[in-house]
Amino acid sequence: MAITHIDHINLSGSAALIDACRAFYVDILGLRDGVRPPFRSRGYWLYAGAQPVVHLTVRERDETSAPDDATSSFDHYAFACEDAAAMRARLQQAGIAFEADEVPETGDVQFFLRDPAGIGLELNFRRR
């Protein structure tokens, strides 16, 4: 058995951070709110098509809770995307800093940016 693709990622943090992340992923990156099972925790499941790819969970604060930042060893995650020009315009209009790169030999375009929690994102646009 081999891994075939990312199923989902889960980000947790304070209610304020999770709401900011939800707005970022929905309003800027174009995911949509979707059905989330009735867990005891609060949060959102954000969908790309029929797949819930980003799970956001409100972390109840206690003495062992991690701070709302990205100081772990986690570096970034990547999404396969479409329409680089539209995404570039959307990011620029929102004033979100990003770096663009082109993959040698393939010509695929990559955008590198950070979400409101400081987590790195790689948006991949395949050259067809």
Image: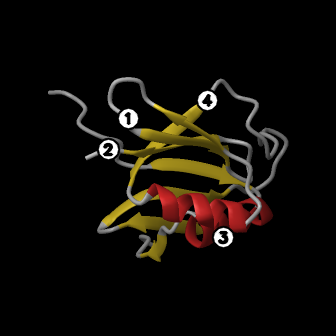
Say which label, 3 or 2, has the lower sequence index: 3
Coloured how?
secondary structure
Which residue: 38% across, 57% down? 82
Please tell me whether mark 1 sits on a helix, a strand or a loop.
Answer: loop
Q: Nearer the viewer, mark 1 or mark 4?
A: 1
Say which label, 2 or 1, has the lower sequence index: 1
Say which label, 1 or 3, has the lower sequence index: 3
Q: Is residue 72 above or below residue 69?
A: above
Q: Which residue is mark 3?
A: 23
Q: Nearer the viewer, mark 4 or mark 2?
A: 2
Q: Nearer the viewer, mark 1 or mark 3?
A: 1
Q: Which residue is mark 2?
A: 127
Q: Nearer the viewer, mark 3 or mark 4?
A: 3
Residue 73, numbered circle: none
Amino acid type shown at disc 2: Arg
Q: Position of residue 17 (x, y in %)?
A: 76, 59
Say which label, 3 or 4, has the lower sequence index: 3
Q: Which residue is mark 1?
A: 107
Cα distance in 3D space between marks 3 and 2:
29 Å
Cα distance in 3D space between marks 2 and 1:
6 Å
Q: Position of residue 48 (x, y in %)?
A: 38, 64
Is residue 7 rendered to the left or right of residue 32?
left
State which quarter of the image contains the N terminus: top left
Which residue: 61% across, 66% down? 90
Residue extending furthest toward the left: 1
Which residue: 51% across, 68% down? 30
Amino acid type shown at disc 1: Gly
Please tell me whether mark 4 sits on a helix, a strand or a loop.
Answer: loop
Q: Which residue is mark 4?
A: 74
Cα distance in 3D space between marks 1 and 3:
31 Å
Whether label 2 touches label 1, CB < 8 Å:
yes
